Amino acid sequence: MILHDLLSFELLRVIWWLLLGVLLIGFALTDGFDMGVGALLPFVAKTDNERRVVINTVGPVWEGNQVWFILGGGAIFAAWPPLYAVSFSGFYLAMFAVLAALILRPVGFKYRSKRESAAWRSSWDWALFVGGAVPALIFGVAVGNVLQGVPFYLTEDLMPIYDGTFYWKFLALLNPFAILVGLVSFGMLLMHGAAWLTVKTEGVIADRARTIGAVMGLIAMAGFALAGVWLAFGVDGYAIVGAVVADGPSNPLHSEVSRESSWLAAYSARPWIAIAPALGFIGMAMAIRGLRSGGEVSTLLWSKLGIFGVISTVGLTMFPFILPSSVDPKSSLTVWDASSSHLTLFVMLVVTVIFMPLILLYTAWVYKVLWGKVTEDDVTANSDSVY
């Protein structure tokens, strides 16, 4: 247990905050282009063969990519149980909408080409659109609400209580700032999906993807800039008052939190974090340039950098907060008071160190084996074995 003693509770909390970010970014970088491709499907492909080409660019990899989503949820459940309990209570209907949309994807992939009927196939094409567009939008809406603070408070026994009725909780999520952040997410992932299609397809499909992807990238960039201005002047930030007890018990009610500063105060305290939004803008701008100039692999890599920068911006700006409360700032969850025990975090870290490299190696191998463009000739020649 020497290593356990060397890794302090404070350090393990920071490590697991970083790992949660890695898992969420990994999900956005991989399953993000799956969702983007699904949302683009009715617009970049017009004929049945074209749509089968688009579907088969992600068909072999989408299930593996979605593992990152499961890992992220598992990490929240095991490493940050208060966050899991509070967020899944307040965002229940939103989470249900996301899961319902995600369920449409496997059904759509499997059933879409089982019948020759044009109406049948068109219906599943739009189901795949919903399966990509709805999660891409709602994930961003959720982040927008987290930045504003979520209307919950904790009782003395740490039970989360939400303001409003069950259905109003969902409608209240659809506020202007949250919708703006949702549009950033939507545009960013559609740009990412378009970048993937330029790598995996050719001809008219790739040309349409470049045109639509560049427009969605511009929307994402403009929305990201506007959200930054709105965050600076229209959204209150949070700050811990007094000394931070980084290795204290997981009880948010032991901390004093104020809601008088701006989130952008973090950039005065830690100027180096400005690299995150810079990477976001640079990555998206270069991805748009690549889409317009006909780039392929480099465009996809720039798109990944943009997504990395945007998501990192949110995490670094909010640190150490992970779920602030708008009705009782003292109930806000932070890195220092919302984690599992020291031993739990240590055991999870050991397991992660062993298995994460295996997952990454397997993922890299899969992409290497499946590398190459999907063409209409491929779909026609293998009509019975592809989606």
Image: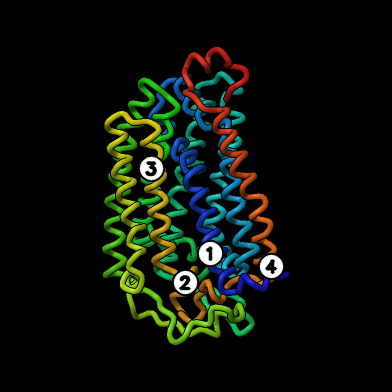
Q: Between residues 323 and 304, which one lies in front from this camera angle?
A: 304
Q: Is residue 46 left or right of residue 268?
A: right
User: What is the distance, in whole Å, between disc 3 and disc 4 at their CAs?
Assistant: 35 Å
What is the distance, in whole Å, between disc 3 and disc 1 at their CAs? Answer: 24 Å
State how far apart marks 4 and 2 are (Cα): 20 Å
Of callouts 3 and 1, the N-terminal one: 1
Q: Spatial distance from mark 1 to mark 2, Cα to Cα?
A: 9 Å
| Residue of label 1 | 17
Please say if the residues under marks 1 and 4 sit with CB atoms less than 8 Å apart.
Answer: no
Say whether marks 3 and 1 touch (CB < 8 Å). Answer: no
Between residues 375 and 174, which one lies in front from this camera angle? 375
Q: Circle 1 — which element?
A: helix
Tag shown at residue 303: 3
What's the distance in space between the residues labelled 1 and 4, CA to CA?
A: 14 Å
Taking the view exactly as shown, the residue that stands out farthest to the right is: 1
Disc 2: which residue = 320
Asked which secondary structure carries label 3, the reply is: helix
Q: What's under tag 2, amino acid-wise? A: Pro
